[in-house]
Image: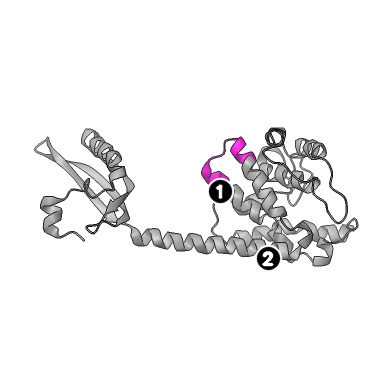
Amino acid sequence: MYSLQELETETTVLAMGAAKQRDRAARTFRQALESGSAPTGEYRAIRRNGSTFPALVSSRAMVKDGRLVGIRGILIDVSQRVEAARRVQNALSDTIHALAVTTEMRDPYTAGHQERVTHIACAIGQEMGLSEDRLEGLRVAGILHDVGKILVPAEILSTPTVLTPTEFGLVEIRSESAYEILRAIQLPCPVADIVLQHHEPMDGSGYPKGIRGDAILLETRILGVADVAEAIVSHRPCRPARPMAAAARAAGTLYGAEVAAACMRLFERGTLPLMG
């Protein structure tokens, strides 16, 4: 730590910044001089012993008798806040992983499905220019989109025959079950809503709400295309795998032409080769 005398006479906020970030800090201070203040930013700062730590830096021009006489910089150590946020993020990641593993244990016939759907969905999202925050929400939604299977009887999930209306009714509730599970967890973006809607095709023929068109989130449309494409080209107990062309036709008709086109571009480029 620096002594009070060192802070007052020998050391400046700029000098306490990590070398790679001093140019950025200097630009911030110039902005404060020109406009009176600058937005608070996060930097890596240097302790007296040479170790670094995350810090918030705020700067403001100092004016006396109407004249600019200097600039005041305030540096706040936020190490504890950053560490607390890291622990929360790790706990959230562990929760997501545990839910995903539990889902796959319930339905071994589709083991790997969630991971493949997530890979396809995120690639489509990148192809369509989604922001990093929206891609992260899409990634989590992909991992957890089938978590509602936890409440569906295992014998129905693995049946090799066409489901009866009663059995299919039990399968349909999985989207709402997943929503109830996920809305209680603080997840990035509207993950619970994306998962709730992921069986809602563009023509309104889906479940649980029968919504259509723009009422369906873009992330949901992407997840829907990824889900149907992966499912169609993969073997299932009740039917064999089908070619990618069939997946493309279904996706384009039911889940949005723009998203389906982005998916097809990826497959045609060989970016997303699938089995089947």
Q: Secondary structure at mark 2?
A: helix
Residue visible at 87% across and 49% down in the picture: 240
Q: Which residue corresponds to the image point at 65% horizontal and 61% vertical from the top-left?
A: 100
Magenta span dominant secondary structure = helix
Where does label 1 land, which residue? Answer: 136
Q: Which mark is residue 102?
A: 2
Q: Is residue 136 above or below residue 171?
A: above
Q: The N terminus lies in which quarter of the figure?
A: bottom left
Whole-percent x, y for residue 108 in the image: 77, 62
Residue at 29% x, 48% y: name it: 18
Side of 252 relative to 39 (left or right): right
The disc, 1 or 2, on the residue closer to the chain's N-terminal end is 2
**Closer to us: 1 or 29:** 1
The kind of residue on which mark 1 rests is Glu
Tell me residue 271's x, y (percent).
67, 38
Residue 83's quadrant in the figure? bottom left
Residue 125 in magenta?
A: yes
71 sits left or right of 220 in the view: left
State the image quarter where residue 269 is shown. Answer: top right
Q: How is the image coloured?
A: one colour
- Looking at the rendering, the stretch of residues picked out in magenta corresponds to 124-135
Cα separation, mark 1 vs mark 2, equals 21 Å
